[in-house]
Amino acid sequence: MAVTSMERLFQGADWDFATLQRVYDACHTVGVSELGLDIYPNQIEVITAEQMLDAYSSIGMPLFYKHWSFGKHFAHQQAFYRKGLMGLAYEIVINSSPCISYLMEENTATMHTLVIAHAAFGHNHFFKNNYLFKLWTDAEGILDYLDFAKNYVARCEERYGPAAVERTLDAAHALMSHGVHRYAGKKKLDLRQEERRERDRQAHNERIFNDLWRTLPAGAARATPDLEAERRRSLAGLPQENILYFLEKAAPRLAPWQRELLRIVRHVAQYFYPQGQTKVMNEGTATYVHYRVMNRLHQLGAIGDGDFLEFLKSHTNVVFQPGYDDPRYSGLNPYALGFAMMQDIERIVTQPQDEDREWFPDIAGTGDAMAVLRDLWANYRDESFVAQFLSPHLMRRMRMFHLNDDPADKAGMKIGSIHDERGYRRIRRQLSRQYDVGWIDAHIEIVDVDLAGDRRLILRHTVVNGGLLAETDLKRVLQHLADLWSYDVLLREVDGSDTVLKEHLVSPRRAALAA
Amino acid sequence: MHIVDRRLNPGGKSLENRQKFLRRAKALVQRAVAKSAQGRNIQDILEGGEISIPLDGLEEPRLHRGAKGVREHILPGNKHFIEGDVIPRPDGGGGGDPREGGSGDGEDAFRFILSRDEFLDLFLDDLELPDLAKTKLANADQVKPVRAGYAVVGSPANIAVNRTMRLAMMRRVALHRPKQDTLERLNAEIADCDDDERRLTLEAEVKALQSKVRRIPYIDPIDIRYRYFENEPKPVAQAVMFCLMDVSSSMSEHMKDLAKRFYMLLYIFLVRQYRQVEIVFIRHTDRAEEVDEDTFFHSPATGGTQVSSALLAMQQVVAERYPPADWNIYAAQASDGDNSYSDAAATEQLMNDVILPVCQYFAYLEVDEMGSSPVSGSSLWTLYERINTQWPLLSLRRVCSRTEIYPVFHELFQRRAA
């Protein structure tokens, strides 16, 4: 706490680049020196509203391959934005090194301060330190890899025609949610190496190409000995829940470039995999950090009272949580929940009550809130964070209750538990489940295929609580899958006792994808 | 930390994605454009605007669970529930959530905004002037470069490498430029040579050859040739469209409005799709006059009706400015179909003998009161129908409400199979 006061950073709403620099330096002083954040180098980019829309439609990345679905989102968002139905987000931040944050030029100096504290310090610290991001993403390599992906897709369009590329990407996108590895493999993803590997493989193929091989007479097909089903499955690496990975490796009739496209989509899905699991923590961290930084700056006199009120207005909008019966209610707001939990932990660490000591003996009253929070930010994801640190105090404050909706029960929905002694643990367990990807995503895996026989791909969806897959979408996705696989695809929906609830069989469309 | 100002970066990063999306949704968008154009003013059509399309073939399916099955929710804001309460389900199905999320099932129509150019492109797509056959070497603004041999001067981009090398070789052979291997052989011989006298001779020879090599260059500037191009005028199809409008007092405001809308569409279409089309506006009552665009669309006139006057005016303009040998001549006539009885014979004769023989295509649009039924045709309609049996290039259409204008227009100028 070396600093005791600061110069006013800006007067009024106007800003220029010198202001941004001063604001950044002030945030740096508070964030790094006082809160002890550990961040990637920052790069702050000032953009227009139109560029913000552009960034939206390519899932926030500064460069991305071209596909019609992004155009669709762009058209949609533009229509909404023009009508004023939707405001734009204040910021977009990219998990890369250097960490890129976008500022919109329309915003006031106060908003810029808020966004810098939020994105360039809060999110940045989280990206750099959280174990999931460390494990699954490669912040240094991602931009180069996306650049490679963009060029690769463009080259494929040139060589094989836009229609073929589009069909492959459509199919790959449909399976994107089932194109991630959920368990860490032997080595870390190195995206730079990915790019080199693809180049080398291509060069190697060209070097060893010999047209004579084509002219060799085909001998009589060798009869493959009937492998045992068990052995056959283990040879093919089954069961496999990463559908895209399996297609890339084993689909019999895909061209090499199609496999590479699947690989690209798979890598992108993998890159975003941690983000889906840390929504509450990520936003909670950023919100908590900007709240601390802004308060401190105000306290030091670096921002005026009027500016501080403007900040509080935006802040309360962001962390507003309407009740379940409010027309504005659309699920738990990750900003609100995350921020409330972080503040609650700060309270537990600094001013614990008896209840807190009983529930959180490890952290209650240790005194250094930032040390505890930094440790949480590094080592938890939403599911484990909620499961271990949602306190009874907060459940009471947010008046949480658990609703059990069983269609078999004709009378209505049952209130399972409320915020009382009996309910705390149940609510906490249930809420943490809501954030568990293993629980949210349907569990689908490829279980069997006889490559030497009819090549029918058999998938299995393990149904939990009778939740079958939505039929219309399922048919479409399976159609895409069958087109990539080029043979029949069968999906069985099976419940816990191995009873088959439903079967879906789809045949590939003629000449749809593979040659 | 770096601050980068990206505001001046070229915008439209999503343009390509947007084009891909429009291509994919083309059929749907086109239908929506035609539909939305019916209810709109011409000026509004020119502005582009919002359209809404259904999502056929544009869904992005994902695997997700449906609405069935047991669901558990944690909700905030409990007011009076206690454990074990049973509350009725909200209306609208068995599931807890009223609407299933996801982008596939149950999404509304998709609304978005088309820019002016995109809108017009789709609006006028697959329209063309029929039978644009006569081409002519017209004004020289359309030229095409053709090969015309070689020249000794030119731009470096046009250098003819083969020709240059050939000339260089001819010169080298003719002047006996020593070859590289000859020199090498002599040098090797010198190295092996024991005899001093012989060596001196050889060295002198090498020296002589080397000086010859220096004097006769491998490529001399006089060898260099450039490909030469000459500009050849390109034959272009020139076309003129005659817009003949009846403005007599028998035309009600509604009919005039229909006719003007039709010509407005025609005007947009021609101006946008063809660079080489001229438009002549002729309006007539019992006498005809050639007017400019502004007068044609905006200024009022009134009087009796003599269709032949307009045809005569057209004949005159054709004779003065558009020789039928060089020009593709088109005409679009709009009228309520009334013609003075005495004029019929003159009209028929003019059409048969003068107008139709020089025309590539003649579109006749009859405008009617709203809701009137096309019973026995008007005098002009009957007459044209008779002429039509001999002249298939005459097309007749009837319109009585605004919404029909675009479909009829589209029908008249649809791209036909060759």
Image (cartoon, coloured by chain):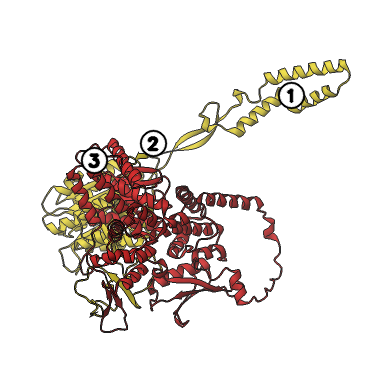
Rounded to the nearest whole Å, what is the CA distance between mark 3 and mark 1?
85 Å
Q: Please, what secondary structure does the residue beneath circle 1 have?
A: loop
Q: Is residue A25 above or below residue B205?
A: below
Q: Position of residue A259 (x, y in %)?
A: 53, 59
Which image quarter: residue B349? Answer: bottom left
Q: Which residue is mark 1?
A: B178
Rounded to the nearest whole Å, what is the CA distance between mark 1 and mark 2?
53 Å
Which image quarter: residue B258? Answer: bottom left
Q: Nearer the viewer, mark 3 or mark 1?
A: 3
Q: Which mark is residue B140?
A: 2
Dot 1 alpha-carbon crowd within 10 angstroms: few under 14, some 14 to 19, many 20 or more: some
Q: Which chain is yellow?
A: B
Q: Amino acid at mark 2?
A: Ala
Q: Residue, x 22% and y 49% (percent of image)?
A: A311
What is the chain letter for disc 2? B
Q: Is residue B321 above or below residue A95?
A: above
Q: Which mark is residue A302?
A: 3
Q: Are marks 3 and 2 on the same chain?
A: no
Q: Position of residue A433 (x, y in %)?
A: 37, 69
Asked whether residue A143 is in view, the answer is: yes
- Outermost residue toward the right? B195
Q: Quadrant of the C terminus of chain B?
A: bottom left
Q: Which mark is residue B335?
A: none
Q: Position of residue A258 (x, y in %)?
A: 52, 59
